[in-house]
Amino acid sequence: MKELATVLRYPSVGAIRTAAHRGRLPVRLYQFSHKRGKFAKVEEVAACLHAMESGNKT
């Protein structure tokens, strides 16, 4: 989550959590039964960054 906040330019992990809770995070978060925390797929983050660079919304 910390890395995701940095890459997507959110001010904190709390801001990522709030955006996800409100349905405004541009990538989907996944939770795995054998891991703590939530994760985003690298491919989805890359697609989001590409869309942001192109000026499109996802």
Image (spheres, helix red, strand yellow):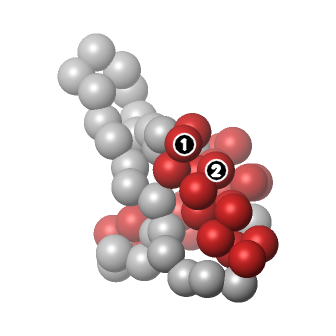
Camera-nearest residue between 44 and 11: 44
Residue on which disc 1 sits: 43
| CB atoms of marks 1 and 2 within 8 Å | yes
Identity of the amino acid at label 1? Glu
User: In the picture, which quadrant includes the N terminus?
Assistant: top right
Q: Residue 6: x percent and y percent? A: 75, 54
Q: How many marks?
A: 2
> What is the secondary structure assignment of the residue under circle 2?
helix
Q: Is residue 7 left or right of residue 17?
A: right
Rate crowding at label 2 as few (under 14), some (14 to 19) or many (20 or more) other CA atoms within 10 Å. few
Residue that appears at 39% across and 66% down? 20
Q: CA distance from mark 1 to mark 2?
A: 5 Å
Residue on which disc 2 sits: 46
Residue that appears at 64% across and 50% down? 46
Residue that appears at 53% across and 63% down? 16
Q: Residue furthest front?
A: 54
Q: Which mark is residue 26?
A: none
Identity of the amino acid at label 2? Ala
User: Is 22 situated above or below 50?
Assistant: below
